[in-house]
Image (cartoon, helix red, strand yellow):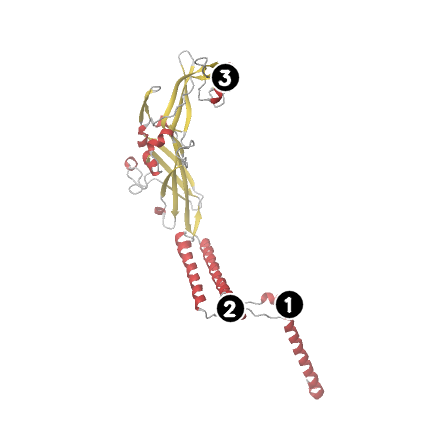
Amino acid sequence: MATFAINSLLNYKTEKYIDTKNKAVGVLHRLFQLSVIGYIIGWVFIVKQGYQEIDDAIQSSVITKVKGTAVTNTSESGLLVWGPEEYVIPPQGEDVLFVVTSFLETPNQKMGYCAESYKVANARCSVNKDCKKGKMVESGHGVMSGKCIRNNENSNGTCEIFGWCPTEKDIKPQKPLLKNAENFTIYVKNFIQFPKFSFSKSNILETTDQSYLKKCRYDKKQYPYCPIFRLGDITRRAGCNFQDMATLGGAIGIVIQWDCDLDKGTSHCNPEYQFTRLDATVSNKSIAAGFNFRHARYFKNAAGESYRSLCKVYGIRFHILVHGKAGKFAIVPLVINIGSGLAVMGAGTFFCDIVLLYLTTGRKSYKDKKFEVLKYEKQHTMEKDNQNSVTCQLLSVRRSCPNLISQV
């Protein structure tokens, strides 16, 4: 038994091939093979560069700088000149920044008692008992004092609160106050690194011209490697009108895509920019569109009393998003993709066998040649009969020639 197992392990078994004279199936088989070869060469190796090792763990650093000035003149703030120090938040230049395009100011607020805004629904009242003393006003501006303030006895009013007075003006801007913001520029400095290949690069054109960054503005055809973008051009490329978007604000994504073929050299590793509006909705009337927030400036007068100016600012929030991958030749992905292609080619043989076995007119004859059925019981009986026949012949010889047998 052990000898049989060892011999079985040391034996070599090969497949049986049948040359089938069927032109239709032969053409089908060759077409399948050509399709697989075309897929491997054309798609896997040429388009997808399947011979390369890929590193998509891109490491990135983004530094931004905004330049430009604008002038506003309002009844609350008077004549103001806006520079990057005022309209860029945060000012240190990160991959997310906010540029103010409009604002509403409530100046000289002082801590004290005043009527809550009528637009705060749960602060409306008709009598004093509607205003519970000490209760915080939800979505309001202070704490109820217990008094209802009305213009006359026949009208409804609002609860008196203790907080920063007068309360904020609750109106929406009809147009952007910083109209020149369309001409502001953003300088986006991006450094990337692919650690697997120890490769790094930046999105700034390598040149000795010191005036290049002063005169260039990004343009896909004329200046594709200029990192300075005009705000009006960014919103236009995102499919938006700047003046409309600047009125109530919004969010725009600046996508920097790095697709680097390191087999061709560093000159083939360049950034591509895409611009898209991130707060876009299905309906233009959605209340979700736009972007704003509040901040305050605090100060004290000569008597030591605290005041503040509350600003509700509208503007465009820019998100710089960096994606990318790098590829370089490696033997492992090459062998894996070739092996996968050969395995797929083997599926063509299986498919053609199915056609010959079940879909052709000569399927019975092909099946007889393809499969040989060997019954073990019949073979065992034949071997036993042959053994008995040999035994009988030996006995017959022994009877007729005993001297010959003894000599043997």
Q: Earlier in the sequence, mark 3 or mark 1?
A: 1
* Residue 131 visible within the image: no
Q: Say which residue label 1 marks.
A: 3
In the rendered image, the quadrant that contains the N terminus is: bottom right
Amino acid tagged 3: Met
Q: CA distance from mark 3 to mark 1?
A: 100 Å
Residue 381 vertical position relative to residue 43 in the rendered view, above or below = below
Q: Residue at x 69, y 80 (%)?
A: 391
Q: Nearer the viewer, residue 175 or 376?
A: 175
Q: Earlier in the sequence, mark 1 or mark 2?
A: 1
Q: CA distance from mark 2 to mark 3?
A: 93 Å
Residue 293 location (% of width, % of height): 42, 27
Residue 232 location (% of width, % of height): 32, 34
In the rendered image, the quadrant that contains the C terminus is: bottom right
How packed mark 1 is, by other alpha carbons closer than 10 Å (few <14, some 14-19, many 20 or more), is few
Question: Residue 144: which disc?
Answer: 3
Using residue 348 as the reference point, say whether residue 2 is left or right of it: right
Q: Say which residue label 2 marks.
A: 363
Q: Quadrant of residue 319?
A: top left
Element assignment for label 1: helix
Using residue 154 as the reference point, say whether residue 391 is left or right of it: right
Element assignment for label 2: helix
Amino acid tagged 1: Thr
